[in-house]
Amino acid sequence: MQIGDLARAAGTKVVTIRYYEKIGLLREPERSAGNYRSYSPDALDRLRFIRRCRELGFSLDQIRDLLALSSDTEQSCAEVDEIVAVHLAEVEKKIVDLQALAEQLRSISASCTGGGTISNCRIIDAISPD
């Protein structure tokens, strides 16, 4: 399949595929007689794996490690567990930070009566630097 077909099948952009090739997440494809990229079904599976990892917030380095680990199906999954544990800790930290942010925004929003002018807006005052 050509790059446009791969992009449509994976729900991504051509430029993203080229970027993943450039950084080594996707292998350089074979070329057709007309010098078009020709992707195998394995490339689609790999791209879908990468996209799913990105949706889950894994970094490109973590994805690179997961891809390398997934290529040896007989090895222990301890390294995969470690990557996921680190990522989970990062996600949980972000959740705590986002909950604190939400509380601050609720507090700021509650201080607004909604009937004044911008010059007297409590929300603008609260988010403006001192």
Image (tube, grey):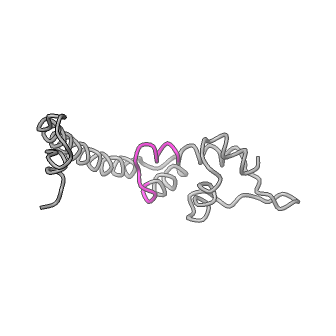
Q: Nearer the viewer, residue 76 or 52?
A: 52
Q: Position of residue 14 (x, y in %)?
A: 65, 53
Please give the name of the residue rendered at 46% of the width and 52% of the height, measured from the top-left corner.
Answer: 66
In the rendered structure, the answer to whether residue 105 lies left or right of residue 82 reads: left
In this rendering, the answer to whether 93 lies above or below 106 is below
Q: Is residue 54 magenta?
A: yes
Above or below, 88 against 35 in this view is above
User: In which quadrant of the rendered image does the C terminus lie?
Assistant: bottom left
Front-lying residue, 121 or 82: 121
Give the percent coordinates (x, y) of residue 109.
17, 38
Residue projecting furthest to the right: 33
Q: Is residue 42 left or right of residue 122?
A: right
Determine the residue positioned at 67% across, 42% down. Answer: 8
The answer to whether 74 appears left or right of 42 in the picture is: left
In which image quadrant can residue 19 be found? bottom right
Q: Give the residue displayed 80% in from the left and 58% down from the top.
A: 36
- Could you tell me which residue is drawn at 76 percent across and 50 percent down? 2
**Residue 105 placed where, x, y %?**
19, 41
- Magenta stretch: helix, strand or loop mostly: helix
Image mark count = 0
- Could you tell me residue 62's position as x and y percent? 42, 55
What is the magenta range? 51-62
Of residue 47 and residue 14, the one placed in the foreground of this image is 14
Q: Which residue appears farthest toward the bottom when viewing the image?
A: 22
Q: Out of 102 and 47, give the one closest to the viewer.
A: 102
Residue 76 shown in magenta: no
